[in-house]
Amino acid sequence: MYGILSGNTIIARFAAPISVRSNQPIYSSDTLSLKRPVSRRTTQRWEIESMLEPLSAGAHELFTHLVVNGYATAFDIMMPQNYGAVLKRTSSGVATASASAGAASVTVSSNSGLIPKGTFIKFANHSKVYMTTADLTGTGSVGIYPTLRATISSATMTCRDDVKMSCVYDLDTISGMAYTDGILMNLGMIKLVENL
């Protein structure tokens, strides 16, 4: 179950439609010969746009969360995994990973089963969420996107429906409450950006 967390409790579940986007600055221009050189920055963040499941009895939790956190205070969400990756995933056990800052892959140990490409992962004591770029069965090296921000050494890796992402509400999200039918709190589409 994916959604907005208050502590370890999901207070608002994501509902379709939902989109997860990678925001990475890219600079491009056309030359006189119409070639298009492109340069890409190494910075990157995930952005989520989603409907929330309409709330009635628990609406006060989300209302308080929106007002207290506003647009500046970071909070955790349970990161939605790609459905295709969830269907293929057979990984079990506690995986650990090691790699140096700037690496495009990590060495995974203590993993059993398949971690499919397109799986969101996170390392203990590390704020960034990454995505695998290749399948990994068992242990070994797996590509990640974006490149690793800080060195990890035998860090516990979350890779199933337990990946938490620190984020903030985007400025377009209502900081209050909106009701439909008088009893169902329904904010419409909300946007969350990864807190880097």
Image: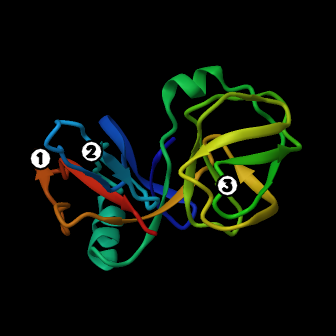
Q: How many labels does the image show?
A: 3
Q: In the rendered structure, which disc, 3 or 1, sits on the residue that comes first in sequence? A: 3
Q: Residue at the location (18% across, 45% down)?
A: 31
> Nearer the observer, disc 2 or disc 3?
3
The nearer-to-camera label among 3 and 1 is: 3
Question: Could you tell me residue 162's position as x and y percent?
Answer: 63, 48
Disc 2, SS: loop
- Say which mark, if any, is on residue 54: 2
First reached walking from the N terminus: tag 2 or tag 3: 2
- Decide if residue 99 is on the left or right side of residue 9: right
Mark 2 neighbour density, 10 Å: few (under 14) some (14–19) many (20 or more): some
Amino acid bearing label 1: Thr
* Label 3 environment density (alpha carbons within 10 Å; few <14, some 14–19, many ≥20): some
Q: Residue at x 67, y 55 (%)?
A: 103
Q: Which amino acid does label 2 sit on?
A: Pro
- The residue that label 3 is drawn on is 103
Indicate left or right for 5 with 66 as reference. Answer: right
Q: Residue 100 at x, y = what percent?
A: 74, 62
Residue 124 appears left or right of 10: right
* Residues at marks 3 and 1 touching, judged by CB atoms closer than 8 Å: no
Name the kind of residue labelled 3 in the image. Answer: Ala
- Contact check, label 1 and label 2, Cβ < 8 Å: yes
Going from the N terminus, do you reach mark 1 or mark 2 first? 2
Where is residue 43? Give x, y as percent.
44, 62
Residue 180 shows which numbered tag? 1
Measured along the vertical axis of the image, is residue 156 above or below residue 195?
Answer: above
Measure the C-alpha gap from mark 3 to mark 1: 48 Å
Q: Residue furthest right?
A: 110
Q: From the viewer's perspective, is residue 88 above or below residue 151?
A: above
Residue 73 is drawn in which quadrant? bottom left
Q: Do the residues labelled 2 and 3 touch (CB within 8 Å)?
A: no
